[in-house]
Image (tube, rainbow, N blue to C red):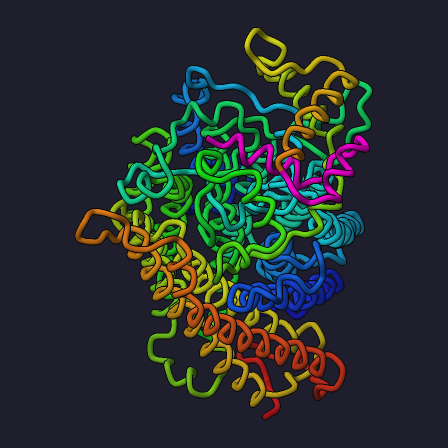
Amino acid sequence: MFHWLEQRPFFFAVMLFLTVAFAGFVEAIPDFAKASQPVVGKKPFTVLQLAGKQVYIKDSCNACHSQLIRPFKAETDRYGMYSLSGEYAYDRPFVWGSKRTGPDLHRVGNYRTTEWHENHMMDPAAVVPGSIMPKYPHMFTNLADIATAYANANTQKAVFGVPYDKKGMPKLGTWKEAKAQALADAKKIASEMKNQQVKDMVAAGKIPEIVALIAYLNSLK
Amino acid sequence: MQSNAQLEYDYSVVKLFTFTTILFGIIGMTIGVILAFQLAFPELSNLAGEYGTFSRLRPLHTNGVAFGFTLSGIFATWYYVGQRTLKMSLKESKFLMRVAKLHFWLYFITILLAVVTLISGYTTSKEYAELEWPLDLLVVVWWVLWGVAMFGMIGMRRERAIYVSIWYYMSSFLAIAMLYIFNNMEVPTFFWSGDAPSSLMHSISMYAGTNDALVQWWYGHNAVAFVFTAPIIGMIYYYLPKESGQPVFSYKLSVLAFWGLMFVYLWAGGHHLLYSTVPDWMQTMGSTMSVVLILPSWGSAINMLLTMKGEWQQLQTSPLIKFMILASTFYMLSTIEGPIQAIKSVNAIAHFTDWIPGHVHDGVLGWVGFMVIAGLYHMAPRIFKRELYSKKLMDTQFWLQTTGIVLYFTSMWIAGITQGMMWRAYDDYGSLLYSFIDTVEVLHPYYTLRGIGGLFYLIGFFMFAFNMYKTATSGRVLEREPEYASPMAS
C-alpha cells in the first residue's frame, strides 16, 4: 500500500491529512461547548479592565506570569483556590501563560492593592528586593486604548453573546457612555494612587496605561 | 538519487532563502542572548525604554528563530531537495518560478512587518501565533503559494515515487495550514467599534478560556512538530545520505516512523495543559501519546545513525557529518526528555519552570539549528559552485556551539528542578518554606551560565555566516559539482 501511495502524491496527501487531523477531531469536538460555561456570578470585564488586559498583552506579561493555579496544596497555599474552567468563560484570548519567571496572577486581586502595583510597576526591585522584573515607567505616560477596549467588549457582546448590558452585568452602552464610565472607574483608581502626573492626567480626562492595568489586575480574584 | 547531468537546477530561490536563514538567524539568536542576560542582569531590561524589556522582546525572539530562521531554512532546502529528488528544474516552468519568487518576497515582507509590529506591542498573546490578523492573512497567502509551488513541482516530476524527504515537507505544509488557520481564528474588533476610534490591528480569539487554551496548545505543540521536527527530518533524510554517500539504512523503518509520527504527534498537545482545566481524559491522552511518540521519533533518528554503519570514520574527517550526527543525537535526547516531562507526576514539578525552555533549546539548538546549518553547508558548494571556505572554522564552530548547547540545557535542568522543588517545599510546621522571590534569586548563577552558553552558540553562528559569505565570494571555483562529500579548504 505504501509503495502505491508514494507514487500517487494526491492520495498520499489526502491520507496524510486524515492521519494528521484525526486527533484534532476526537479531542476538540466532544467537550468544546461544555468547557466555556461561566461559573455562577462570573461577570465580563468592564471596558477599563479590558483596556488593562490589552496592556497586559501588549507588554506580554504572560511571557513570565501564569494565570492558572493547579490543584496542588503548594499552589493553593501560595496563590489561593485552584482555577476552574468556568472562571475563564469571558477570557478572549486566554492568558494562562506557560512559564513562571514571576508568580501566578490568577487571584492577584485578592492580595495586592492599587498602591502596591503602582510602586511595583514603576520599580519592581524597590518593592521586592531581588526581583528581576523590568521596570515599566512608560505605562505611567502612555495612554490606555479605551476605544479599542470598547470595540473589544462590543465584539464580545455582538459576536459571542457575552452578557454586557444585562441585569447585574457591566454596562456597555454607546461609545460615549462607555468612555464616561471608564473615566469614572479610572478616577476611583487614581484616587488611591499617589503619582501626581497620573492623577493630573486622569483629572484631565486621559487614562494612562497603568490605571487600566491596575483595574485589570484588581479584578483578578 | 544520482545527479542527472542533463538537468540544470535553478538555485535563485534557494539562494534568497539561504540569505534570510542567515539574516533572521543572526537577529533571532542575538535577541535570544540579550533575553538570557536580561534574566541574569535585570538592569539590561531597561536600556531601551518600553521597546527593550524582556517581555516585549520575547515574542520577537521566538518568532524570529521559528518563523524567520527555521522556516527560511525549510524553504531554502525545500527548493533544493524538491528539485533534485523530484528530478525537475524550476527553469522548466516560468509559472512555478514566479510563484516561488513571490513566495519568497511576501514571506520576507511578512517577517519584516512581524518585527515592527511585535516590537510595537501588537500581539495576540498566543504563543507562536502572536502575529495580528492582517499579518496572519499575509502568512496564509504565502503558505498557499508554497503549496502551489510544492504540488506544482511534484506534478512535473520525472521520478515516479516521491522520496521520504518530500513526505515530510508535504506533511509540514498540510499540517501547519490546518493548525495555523484554526488557532488564528480571530475576530477583528474594529468592525464592531461603533463610533469609537479603535485600532484596526486588534482582534480577539474565536474561542474563550479553556477552549482557547486547548486550541492554542493543539497548535503550539504541533507547530513544534511540523516546523521543528517533520521538515528537519526531511532534511536529514536527504543531506546525510548525500553527504556520506551511504544509502538510508531501512526503507521499512522510514515508513513506520513517518506514519507513526503523523498519527501520534497531534495527540500530544494536551501535555501542555496537565493539571489545568481542560478535561482529564485529554490530559491523560496527551500524556500517554507523548510517551508513545518516542517510538516514531527514535525510529527516524536510529535510521539515520545506522545509515552511517561501517562509515563512522567520516565522523573524524568531516565536520559536516559531525553536525548531522550530533543533530540526530540531540533529536534523540529531546524526544526522550519531552515524554519524561509529559508524565503527569514529573510535569507537576517541571511545568512553568526553566526546564521547559531548557528542553526546547536542546531540540532547537542541537537538532534544528545544526541540521539547518549542515543543510546550508552542503548546498553551498553546489549552489555557488565553489569549495567551502574553511574546514577549520567549521570545526571550531562545531565545538563552540556544542559546548554552548551543553551549558544551556544542563544549567536549565538544574534551574528548573531546583525551582520546581522549592515551590513545593514545606517546613516542619506545614508552611511554605520559600517565598517566590527566594526561588528567583537562587537561579542567578544558572541564568548567567545559560547566557554564556547562548553566547557561544551565537558566536558559532557568526562563524557560520562568515564561512558562508567567504564560500560564496572567494571559495575556490569548482569545475564540476561534487557528488557526495562537500569539498572544503582546510
Span shown in magenta: A193-221
Image position of B400 with respect to B108: above or below:
below
Q: Is residue B163 visible?
A: no
- The x, y position of residue A65, in whole percent, is 49, 46
State the count of labels: 0
Query: Principal SS element in the magenta part?
Result: helix
| Quadrant of residue B279 within the rendered picture | top left
Residue drawn at point x = 45 percent, y = 18 percent: A38
Image position of A132 with respect to A33: above or below:
below
The answer to which of B343 and B373 lies nearer the viewer is B343
- The x, y position of residue B327, in whole percent, is 44, 69
The answer to which of B192 and A144 lies nearer the viewer is A144
- The x, y position of residue B31, in whole percent, is 63, 64
Relative side of B311 to A195, left or right:
left
The answer to which of A51 and B232 lies nearer the viewer is A51
- The x, y position of residue B385, in whole percent, is 70, 78
Residue drawn at point x = 54 percent, y = 74 percent: B457
Residue drawn at point x = 42 percent, y = 40 percent: B266
Magenta span includes B82: no
Q: Quadrant of the N terminus of chain A?
A: top left
Q: Is residue B377 visible?
A: yes
Relative side of B111 to B483, left or right:
right
